[in-house]
Image (cartoon, rainbow, N blue to C red):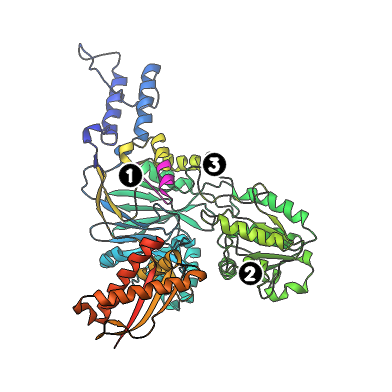
Amino acid sequence: METTKENSSEVAPVAKTQTKQNNKEQKSNKTQDKPRGKTVPQKKKPPVSGNGWTNDTKKSFEINERIQKDRLNPHNKLDLKTNAGVKITPLGGLGEIGGNMMVIETDKSAIIIDVGMSFPDDSMHGVDILIPDFTYLRQIRSKIAGICITHAHEDHIGAMPYFFKEIQVPIYGSPLPLEMIGAKFDEHKMKHHRSYFRAVQKRKPIKIGDFEVEWMHITHSIIDCSALAITSAAGTIIHTGDFKIDHTPIDGYPTDFHRFAYYGEKGVLALLSDSTNSHGTGFTKTEKTVGPTFDRIFKEASKNRIIMSTFSSNLHRVAQAIDRGIAQGRKICVIGRSMEKNIDVAIDMGYLKYNKADFIDAHEVNKYPDNQVLIVTTGSQGEPMSALFRMSIHEHRHIKIKPDDQIILSAKAIPGNEGSVSAIINQLLKAGARVAYQNYDNIHVSGHASQEEQKLIIRLAKPKFFLPVHGEYNHVVKHAQTGVDCGVLERNIHILSDGEQVEITPKYMKKVKTVKTGKTYIDNQRNRKIADDVVLDRQTMANEGFVMIVAQVSIAERKVASPARVTSYGLVDVKSEKYFAKEIEDMLDHHLAHVKEGILENTKALEEDLRKTVRKHCIRKYRKYPMIVPTIIAQ
């Protein structure tokens, strides 16, 4: 990356000369009718009036022009004499949706921002979740002073149990994210690690290693989200976390603009801001716009059972549905492990205020008339193991979709899940249910900032350096352009990638090195890692096929002692199976007759040599690279 430096001569030294200029201006005002010399010194930049006003309107224009430029110039507020710097290393969340994890460090200490997971694609057979590669964190283990959590979404906390199985450090965050992490620790039989929790007070900086970190409230699609103001000797870095600007949030707590403005006036070294919805123009709609849509659907289905599905973490969306269900006299049934856990935590902590008498268990649903039941469940993304999917195919233990049920899918398909969502809608319709999805306006709103909200944060923070984070490459590039439009110098913006480490000081930003990064595969059913070669083998078998050869071989006679057993899967059809087996048997005879003496005496070497020969045949004839497993029994 190109190193960017600012010459001190480019910086307007307002802070250092302000008092001297005011004194000169006051003196000039007193003596303006009695000049002491014959010449009046020329001033390129008019001094700021100590009175706050002047009779000379042209001079006032020039003064105000300079004030406007100075207030937008971040160089004035940074300590350009310091040699202190910080290094920023994303380990996940760049070039992808999810898996967010970042390290910010000095020479002596480091903090981690979020430890999130992501979801596998269709080629990762048997893999439930992906977590970041912790190799770099193992290398700097002694420097890590703590983990700072922005909010409780899975892509920001989902990998915490796996990280804590290796490294234990204090976890700082607001109450809801910590409780969500605690629930994960409980599932992994790590309840004792709750002793590392440090519940923070927002608006109060906390000393963590070489840093002072302040949690600033910000709105998103989950309760109790925070942006971070991270101050070190080099200056202040603001990390927005995931956010949107909702002026009318369900809980009544809008984004804390005052703290962003406070740090913006004080001076921000760098801004790291959420890019996920950077192609969205204008403003993201408020969560409250979903309410009237729910009103309409609930009214139309007043005589029917209603089943609402959304992201289990979107508690404000869930709350809007529950409020309308209670208003209609319905009992609320929550189904789905993650949904049940999140709602229980939110009620116990006081984020949601409901009487538990309004809730019933799944086995009690059939005791009530349809118009007295609201089911809140998981499965809005069409996950095959989700509660809604099992209901739709009549495999759920207690609930089955029946004609005239009103289904509400209050979520947008995550990129890559469109096929799954379409499949579950088809399944629900076949069962006779009515499905409210994209045929209703405002049935779902995004939790991420559109361009105008991104501009607002940039303008409030007024950073010298800007690093867009979170999202695919095209999202980050678009956000970078928005930064340029908001006055950040193009040379002071950098497009990060996972594993890329940059150093930032008040004078420059430069790439330092690239650290090892990547993904670790997790089988969530057993809470264990899956080795990379296992996943590669599964991909090979799924895409290329499988060939198994078992043969008894006479070493002395260099031939097969009895007919070889050849079995293939996914390579040739059933009709061609015998012909293919005969091909391999003939090939084995020829191979034994011509193999080198040293290889013939080593069974493992013989198997490997046979594998190569059969692979070449399959590539040449079938244009496939199947997995080949030969077993030679030597006599």
The percent coordinates of residue 377 (x first, y second) are 63, 65
Label 3 SS: loop
Most foreground residue, 215 or 591: 591
The percent coordinates of residue 380 (x first, y second) are 60, 60
Which label was assigned to residue 494? 1
Amino acid residing under circle 1: His
Left or right, 306 with respect to 104, comes to right
- Whether residue 198 is visible to the viewer of this picture, yes or no, is no
How far is mark 3 from mark 1, CA to CA? 25 Å
The percent coordinates of residue 134 (x first, y second) are 33, 65
How far is mark 2 from mark 1, CA to CA? 46 Å
Label 2 SS: helix
Extent of the magenta region: 464-478
Q: Quadrant of the C terminus?
A: bottom left
Label 3, on which residue? 283
Magenta stretch: residue 127 in it? no
Give the quarter of the image for residue 221: bottom right
Label 2, on which residue? 390
